[in-house]
Image: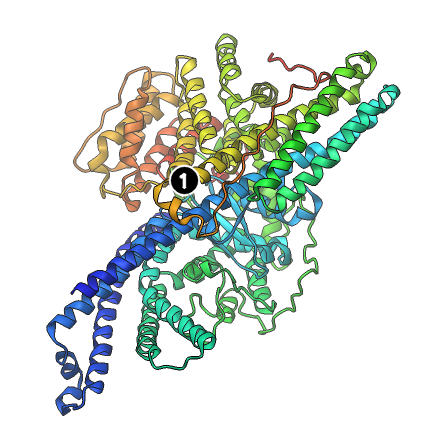
């Protein structure tokens, strides 16, 4: 009789372990799926920036440095995105993407300030449209990022609760997943403000 | 087969499943005991002749050993099933995720190289709207073979999973056939049995799986240590014993599958032909499975116990006929296309098979099916849909529940095509989908609308208010059926919100509804739809057991519902009474009697309570209720699109999806 009880207990333990393992995998899949949403929006943003710079060039030939800084920051962020998309569970890749995104935000912010001195550019139809698209993509990125961060938090929290915390490392879920965090940017200057009517 | 009958069958099958499971477990216990007894008798030095028959073998074991084995087998099977059951409690998406599925969104398929995935999303959306179901999330499974599945406890938490190979190798018609097959599984309630079947099979097959694992482990240990001692022998014996039991488990598992699900594959194939009116689609897909070198095989180890929910056979093992989860391919093809010559097309990966440009709204009917072309002409055209009414025939409406045909597909396509592109894009995007729902909820009255809008501005995420304002302008003059279509389209996007985002969204929706101090019936329907479909996704599916077999038992609740409907569509007291009487008559109550509730404003908490009670009706009692609702709404002979949408919403709340084919363009009574 004892052997049976022992066997059943062992089986139950085994299942319990497998269920922890499965839950970890599920949560990981969820935040990976959430990252692909960010990826889409970021890609769209990176596609918009060269057009923006191209339009701005015609008006502000004296600000080459600012424009080049935007382009190089954009390229850096693009490379960061590719690395992060290859494995969203890689914390350092996500960190790098976050800092590249921060840098790009800074460069765009400076461009935005400089643009203040060029009212013609701000009034340019093309520019206004691009800025609006950029702002709206920006909002979508922020939103997708929030969803991703929520899922990552779920994953990390589960990993740190009592029984899973013992086995997570053994199951290949050692390090915490990284939150994608950086300062939200102000809206682009040229973006027309939307009012409800 | 009629929808209600299919639902009822599915429910009875669940009971049948429990009976078969018990029988299988008992047989496993008996078999294990026999096996142990046989080993015991053969290994003991003397075998008495009377022990060589069945009863002799069984009595040769001491009672204690008997008990031991029985408890052991029961424990293992029980724990294994329970474990699996707890896992699938998360609903359809858990299954898709455990197979490594990637959630497909319109956003992630916007690049040209993802055009095939976009086509898949379009096909699924069309089919869902045509059947009056919420659009299910679609997962792409990273496998090169041709296969697909539907999983979930019901339409609300159902997901569709499709292999990469399916997306790449099938053309639109074939894809539509496969998706129609899966929708038939959802509508007929097969998915819910299939999900439970996973847990049951896991329990029965588990002992064999352990045996297989031990055998592999021992073999591996032998090769690495090569110490060649005999200590592994008893373990080997145990493993072989478990394997034998495992095969017995497989046998019972297949028996259960055959009894519960295998026959339903033929039904779903037939339904796919009925839904699309195009036998070439589904048979073409099946033929391509036959011609593809990977066929429908799934490599993921998680696919084994989910194999019965796939479109095609998942494993192609040497014991093919014994372990088959599906009827043989050639039989399935023959059942659809009796003239088939037995030749499979050669399918090579990388060769584009799609010749149909996506976005073309025309139905690619086969030349052999002239009806399709005729149907296109008589169906509602996008232009005529501006003013839609409902066919004023309660029986016709009741028959439409859960049914899908080419006419429904045409109606759905017309609805989709005549919807503003900007709004469709918004519905497909998780970010703007919320803005869209908020915009739909905005009041007509300007003062109320300003109050609602300022709530959105202070409570919604950044940028959403701007979206709401922009989309509201596009929504002007949009009729209720189109609004309902948009809400259904937005479901997959809303389901991809994170939990905190969902909480915020739902609380905003409730605030917006309450802010104008008057809850309207359309608002109530919208809220019911959102809650009904989103809650199971975010908070785990909740099952309520059907309790009432007779309308009489829930007469009061039915009275509340019919009173609400009678009040809504009719202005004066006489018309209301007449409408209510028409509905009450259709209920065919035997004992109870119901009265029209003459209160002017609907009491929504009572209505909620009533719908909750009514949704617990058994499937075969529901057609009368739907008919009564339809009779009340159509009593005055005039049924507007708004009333139709209300009917759809109420039917959906009662788990009876009502397709948009009930709508008719004004003045057009083509049937």
Q: Is residue B320 above or below residue A106?
A: below
Q: Position of residue A39 (x, y in %)?
A: 63, 38
Q: Quadrant of the N terminus of chain B?
A: bottom left
Viewer-side residue, B26 vs B268: B26
Badge 1 element: helix
Q: Residue at x 56, y 70 (%)?
A: B339
Q: Is residue A98 above or below residue B254?
A: above
In the picture, measured across the screen, residue B48 lies left or right of residue B543, that is left
Q: Position of residue B285 (x, y in %)?
A: 57, 61
Q: How is the image coloured?
A: rainbow
Number of residues whose C-alpha sits closer than 10 Å to that of mark 1, classed few (under 14), some (14–19) or many (20 or more):
few
Viewer-side residue, B61 vs B612: B61
Viewer-side residue, B97 vs B647: B97
Q: Which image quadrant is residue B343 in?
A: bottom right
Q: Position of residue B433 (x, y in %)?
A: 54, 29
Q: Is residue A149 above or below residue B458?
A: below
Q: Is residue B231 above or below residue B652?
A: below
| Residue that sits furthest to the top in the current view | B447
In the picture, measured across the screen, residue B77 lies left or right of residue B161, that is left
Q: Chain of mark 1?
A: A
Tally of marks: 1
Residue A104 seen in the current view: yes
Viewer-side residue, B193 vs B11: B193
Where is mark 1, residue-wise? A160
Q: Which image quadrant is residue A113 in?
A: top right
Q: Position of residue B536 (x, y in %)?
A: 39, 38
Q: Residue at x 60, y 13 (%)?
A: A196
Residue B671 seen in the current view: no
């Amino acid at each position: 009789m004892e052997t049976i009880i022992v066997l059943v207990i062992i089986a139950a333990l085994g299942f319990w372990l497998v269920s922890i393992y499965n839950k970890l995998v599920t949560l990981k899949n969820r935040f990976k799926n959430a990252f692909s949403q960010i990826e889409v929006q970021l890609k769209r943003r990176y596609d918009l920036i060269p057009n923006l710079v191209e339009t701005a060039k015609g008006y502000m030939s004296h600000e080459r440095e600012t424009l080049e800084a935007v382009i190089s920051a954009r390229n850096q962020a693009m490379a960061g995105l590719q690395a992060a998309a290859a494995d969203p569970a890689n914390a350092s890749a996500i960190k790098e993407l976050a800092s590249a995104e921060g840098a790009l935000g800074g460069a765009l912010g400076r461009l935005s300030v400089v643009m203040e001195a060029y009212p013609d550019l701000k009034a340019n139809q093309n520019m206004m449209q691009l800025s609006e698209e950029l702002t709206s993509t920006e909002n979508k990125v922020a939103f997708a990022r929030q969803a991703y961060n929520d899922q990552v938090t779920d994953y990390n929290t589960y990993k740190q609760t009592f029984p899973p915390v013992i086995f997570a490392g053994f199951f290949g879920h050692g390090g915490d997943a990284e939150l994608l965090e950086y300062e939200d940017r102000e809206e682009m200057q040229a973006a027309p403000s939307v009012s409800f009517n | 087969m009629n929808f209600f009958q299919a639902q009822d069958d599915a429910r009875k099958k669940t009971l049948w499943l429990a009976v078969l499971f018990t029988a299988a477990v008992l047989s496993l216990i008996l078999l294990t005991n026999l096996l142990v007894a046989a080993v015991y008798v053969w290994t003991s030095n003397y075998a008495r002749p009377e022990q060589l028959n069945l009863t002799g073998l069984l009595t040769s074991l001491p009672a204690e050993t008997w008990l031991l084995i029985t408890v052991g087998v029961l424990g293992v099977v029980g724990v294994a099933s329970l474990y699996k059951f707890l896992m699938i409690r998360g609903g359809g998406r858990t299954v898709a995720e455990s197979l490594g599925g990637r959630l497909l969104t319109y956003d992630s398929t916007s690049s040209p190289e993802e055009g095939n995935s976009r086509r898949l999303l379009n096909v699924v959306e069309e089919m869902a709207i045509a059947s009056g179901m919420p659009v299910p999330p679609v997962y792409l499974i990273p496998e090169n073979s041709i296969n697909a599945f539907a999983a979930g406890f019901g339409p609300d938490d159902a997901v569709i999973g499709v292999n990469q190979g399916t997306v790449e190798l099938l053309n639109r018609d074939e894809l539509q056939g496969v998706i129609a097959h899966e929708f038939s599984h959802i509508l007929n309630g097969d998915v819910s049995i299939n999900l439970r079947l996973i847990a049951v099979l896991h329990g029965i097959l588990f002992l064999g799986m352990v045996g297989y694992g031990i055998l592999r482990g021992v073999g591996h240990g032998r090769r690495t240590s090569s110490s060649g001692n005999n200590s592994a022998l008893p373990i080997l014996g145990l493993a072989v014993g478990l394997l034998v039991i495992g095969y017995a488990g497989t046998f019972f598992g297949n028996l259960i599958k055959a009894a519960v699900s295998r026959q339903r594959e033929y039904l779903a194939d037939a339904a796919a032909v009925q839904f699309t009116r195009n036998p070439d689609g589904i048979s073409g897909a099946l033929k391509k499975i036959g011609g593809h070198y990977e066929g429908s095989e799934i490599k993921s180890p998680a696919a084994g116990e989910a194999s019965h929910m796939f479109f095609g056979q998942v494993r192609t093992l040497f014991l093919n006929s014994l372990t088959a989860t599906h009827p043989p391919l050639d039989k399935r093809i023959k059942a659809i296309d009796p003239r088939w010559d037995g030749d499979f097309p050669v399918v090579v990966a990388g060769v584009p098979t799609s010749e149909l440009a996506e976005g073309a709204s025309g139905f690619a009917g086969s030349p052999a099916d002239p009806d399709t072309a005729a149907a296109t002409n008589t169906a509602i055209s996008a232009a005529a849909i501006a003013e839609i009414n409902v066919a004023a025939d309660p029986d016709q409406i009741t028959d439409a529940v859960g049914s899908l045909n080419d006419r429904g597909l045409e109606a759905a396509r017309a609805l989709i095509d005549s919807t503003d592109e900007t709004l469709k894009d918004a519905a497909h995007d998780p970010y703007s989908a919320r803005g869209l729902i908020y915009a739909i909820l905005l009041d007509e009255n300007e003062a109320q609308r300003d109050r609602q809008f300022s709530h959105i501005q202070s409570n919604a995420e950044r940028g959403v208010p701007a979206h709401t304002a922009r989309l509201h302008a596009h929504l002007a003059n949009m009729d209720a059926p189109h609004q309902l279509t948009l809400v259904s389209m937005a479901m997959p996007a809303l389901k991809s919100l994170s939990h905190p985002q969902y909480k915020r969204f739902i609380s905003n929706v409730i605030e917006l509804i309450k802010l104008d101090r008057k809850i309207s019936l359309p608002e109530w329907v919208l809220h019911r739809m959102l809650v009904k479909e989103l809650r199971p996704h975010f908070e785990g599916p909740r099952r309520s057991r059907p309790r009432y077999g007779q309308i009489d038992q829930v007469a009061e609740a039915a009275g509340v519902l019919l009173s609400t409907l009678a009040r809504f569509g009719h202005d004066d007291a006489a018309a209301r009474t007449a409408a209510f009487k028409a509905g009450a008559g259709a209920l065919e109550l035997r004992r109870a009697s119901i009265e029209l509730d003459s209160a002017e404003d609907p009491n929504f908490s009572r209505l909620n309570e009533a719908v909750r009670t009514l949704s617990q009706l058994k499937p075969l009692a529901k057609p009368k209720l739907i008919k009564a609702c339809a009779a009340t709404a159509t009593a005055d002979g005039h049924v507007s699109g708004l009333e139709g949408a209300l009917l759809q919403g109420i039917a959906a709340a009662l788990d009876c999806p009502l397709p948009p084919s009930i709508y008719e363009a004004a003045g057009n009574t083509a049937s």
